[in-house]
């Protein structure tokens, strides 16, 4: 066993022991605790849990690698996955917290109708499932590298561990475990980043110092057959950058597993501050990611540029076993590098390995490599657990309880939820082994679907009293079908042929158009049908004010502070 | 921000079609809500200008300016916009605290907020 494998096992083992201990300490029996942790989680802790829930294998493992190869256009992920929090904090979280129910389908069920609830529950399951697949794949890559398995074996190990853990725990266990997982993943991300920044520029703040290497990186990228790192729209047309960013933002604000976290705060005010803390914790990683991408890419390129094929650095061999790094047949010296297997470049590097390999590429000591592996797993597990919980609650609460067996007991519902989780794990093993695209892209599709289904009906439900159930159902179904159709049309999944993009719009960006379609359909259909009942208008009115009004000094009411 | 416009005009512009009979003093409610909406629109405008404005639409002209090695448009797209997002949510939470207190709708229990 190599030094690296040994340290990896130590860090993964130790971090898992902590998670399991916390989960065991706070294990839950009643349904309320299982799904929303009894609404007693402090704001900062909730923020850290949201951040861990949010930052998945895509953020931790894939994103910096994608940015390294996308260059400037990597901003779609950076802005897209953070900007959505502004929408979430201003348009959604405080109001849904005031409403005070379990899940997103429950909100739309109360606001609109049982039909909309069912549509929303199905949408929540599809979206969460797509997203879980990305996590299984990410966890699989970690295990495959460090246990010396192929990716298939890695995915199975990851899925079994994640599945067991989510089925046994509940929201309460998950919240506190996620706080621990956030700590592990952020430390694992920052330590190598700071070390590399110090090593390469002498300034240990990666966010500030990566500016200094951009010129050098631009030059070597050109030399090895890639676009300049800082050139905008080298990887995607401008319109697509705009649409993908928007789609990821509104998808973020509509993701059921993130929204459900805001029910666990004590108050409306707590929901606002939770959103702030969550984004602050997320920003710590997200502002570091482009620096990691730039530093690692420069290190990688300098390490292989013009080197003969039998004298390549050790990390190339280590990762070649996973099949994610390949040297072209008959190549003697490396003259071109790419992330695209079809490019015919001398060295092909998969985006997904860049962060995990970055300490090895930079020649950092083995314990740091092990720490990063533990961080990657923490990111994949924390998100997968949250997602599996949404799948289980949507299934047991919104489908089984409402549609199948109205007199079911708490125990039966918990069991139904656990069975749904188990099934989701099994199917996601298959999909994780045969993923339709890179981890971050798989996740991006989930966002497109969330953007096109939930965001419009939630926002209209809060801000427009006239919005009714016929409108919401029609809007959600049209938005989902439109978006999914375009994704299937342009992607070679499910055995269909990939068609060219229409108007330069990529499948990741179509969610924006899907959301606009949803907004228009919802508004038009609502206008054409009868307004909602008075009680609903009153409910909507009530969620706008955090609490009952108390007498205040007269001057204040008129608006003069 | 095309997506968020319809609801703002729909929800904020027109008075509720049939005011709930239970609350005769609708004046403060409308005032509170319109101030909330005004704050929201201002913050979302900044959100849009910094991310989609500086980071996407104007990124190429801004890249002509280079500060500490960073082309400015690139910096907004990969760093600056994220810092602004964090500040926007903080400002929103603080301003809403003040608004809630002014109108007496703040919640009684105190929870560990920022400062």
Image (cartoon, rainbow, N blue to C red):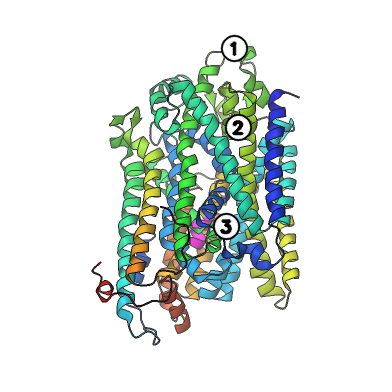
Q: Which mark is residue A87?
A: none
Q: Are marks 3 and 2 in contact (CB under 8 Å)?
A: no
- One can see residue A225 in this view: no
Q: Identify the element where label 2 is drawn.
A: helix
- Dot 1: chain letter: A
Mark 2 vs mark 1: in front: 2
Residue A241 coordinates in the image, percent (x, y) = 42, 43
The answer to whether marks 2 and 1 sit on the same chain is: yes
Q: Residue at x 46, y 63 (%)?
A: B110
Residue A286 coordinates in the image, percent (x, y) = 47, 41
Sequence-first tag of 3 and 2? 3
Q: How many marks?
A: 3
Extent of the magenta region = A449-455
Is residue A20 left or right of A296 when viewed as pictured?
right
Q: Residue at x 68, y 45 (%)?
A: A18
Which residue corresponds to mark 2? A356
Residue B1 coordinates in the image, percent (x, y) = 36, 56
Mark 3 vs mark 1: in front: 3
Which residue corresponds to mark 1? A308
Q: Nearer the viewer, residue A310 or B24?
A: B24
In the picture, which quadrant includes the N terminus of chain A? top right
């Amino acid at each position: 066993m190599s030094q690296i494998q040994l340290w990896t096992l130590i860090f993964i083992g130790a971090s898992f022991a902590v998670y399991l201990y916390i989960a065991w300490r706070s294990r839950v029996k009643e349904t309320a605790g299982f799904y929303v942790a009894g609404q007693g989680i402090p704001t900062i802790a909730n923020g850290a849990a949201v951040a861990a829930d949010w930052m998945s294998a895509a953020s931790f493992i894939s994103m910096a690698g994608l940015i390294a190869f996308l260059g400037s256009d990597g901003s779609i992920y950076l802005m897209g996955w953070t900007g959505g929090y502004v929408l979430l904090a201003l348009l959604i979280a405080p109001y849904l917290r005031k409403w005070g129910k379990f899940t997103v389908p429950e909100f739309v069920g109360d606001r609109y109708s049982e039909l909309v609830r069912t549509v929303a529950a199905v949408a929540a399951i599809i979206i969460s499932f797509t997203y879980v697949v990305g996590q299984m794949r990410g966890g699989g890559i970690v295990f495959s590298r460090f246990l010396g398995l192929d990716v298939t074996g890695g995915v199975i190990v990851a899925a079994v561990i994640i599945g067991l853990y989510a089925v046994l725990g509940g929201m309460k266990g998950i919240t506190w475990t996620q706080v621990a997982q956030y700590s592990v993943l952020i430390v694992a991300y920052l330590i190598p980043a700071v070390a590399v920044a110090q090593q390469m520029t002498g300034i240990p703040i990666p966010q500030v110092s990566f500016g200094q290497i951009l010129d050098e990186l631009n030059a070597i990228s050109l030399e090895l057959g890639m676009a300049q790192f800082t050139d905008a729209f080298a990887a995607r047309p401008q319109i697509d950058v705009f649409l993908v960013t928007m789609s990821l933002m509104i998808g973020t604000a509509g993701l059921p597993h993130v929204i459900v976290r805001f029910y666990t705060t004590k108050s409306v005010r707590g929901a606002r501050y939770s959103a702030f803390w969550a984004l602050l914790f997320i920003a710590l990683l997200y502002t570091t990611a482009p620096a990691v991408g730039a530093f690692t890419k420069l290190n990688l390129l300098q390490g292989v540029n013009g080197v003969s094929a039998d004298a390549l650095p050790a990390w190339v061999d280590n990762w070649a076993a996973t099949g994610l790094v390949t040297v072209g047949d008959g190549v003697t010296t490396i003259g071109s590098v790419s992330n695209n297997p079809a490019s015919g470049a001398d060295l092909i590097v998969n985006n997904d390995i860049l962060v995990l390999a970055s300490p090895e590429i930079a020649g950092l000591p083995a314990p740091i490599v092990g720490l990063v592996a533990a961080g990657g797993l923490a990111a994949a597990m924390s998100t997968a657990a949250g997602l599996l919980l949404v799948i289980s609650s949507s299934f047991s609460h919104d489908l089984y309880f409402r549609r199948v067996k109205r007199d079911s007991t708490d125990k039966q519902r918990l069991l139904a939820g656990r069975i749904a989780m188990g099934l989701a794990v099994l199917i996601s093993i298959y999909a994780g082994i045969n993923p339709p695209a890179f981890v971050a892209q798989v996740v991006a599709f989930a966002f497109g679907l969330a953007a096109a289904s939930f965001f419009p009906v939630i926002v209209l439900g809060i801000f427009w009293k006239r919005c009714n159930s016929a409108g919401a159902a029609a809007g959600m179904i049209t938005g989902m079908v439109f978006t999914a159709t375009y994704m299937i049309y342009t992607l070679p999944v499910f055995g269909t042929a990939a068609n060219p993009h229409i108007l330069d719009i990529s499948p990741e960006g179509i969610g924006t158009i899907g959301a606009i379609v949803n907004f228009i359909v919802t508004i038009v259909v609502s206008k054409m049908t009868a307004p909602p009942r008075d009680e609903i208008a009153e409910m909507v009115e009530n969620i706008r004010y955090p609490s009952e009004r108390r007498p205040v000094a007269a001057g204040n009411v008129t608006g003069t502070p | 921000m095309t997506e968020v416009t319809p609801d703002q005009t729909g929800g904020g512009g027109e008075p509720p079609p049939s005011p709930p009979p239970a609350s005769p003093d609708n004046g403060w409610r409308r005032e509170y809500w319109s101030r909330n909406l005004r704050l929201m629109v201002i913050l979302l405008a900044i959100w849009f200008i910094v991310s989609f404005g500086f980071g996407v639409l104007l990124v190429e002209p801004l890249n002509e300016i280079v500060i500490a090695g960073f082309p400015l448009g690139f910096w907004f797209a990969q760093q600056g916009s994220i810092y602004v997002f964090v500040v926007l949510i903080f400002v929103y939470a603080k301003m809403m605290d003040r608004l809630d207190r002014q109108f007496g709708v703040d919640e009684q229990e105190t929870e560990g907020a920022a400062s």
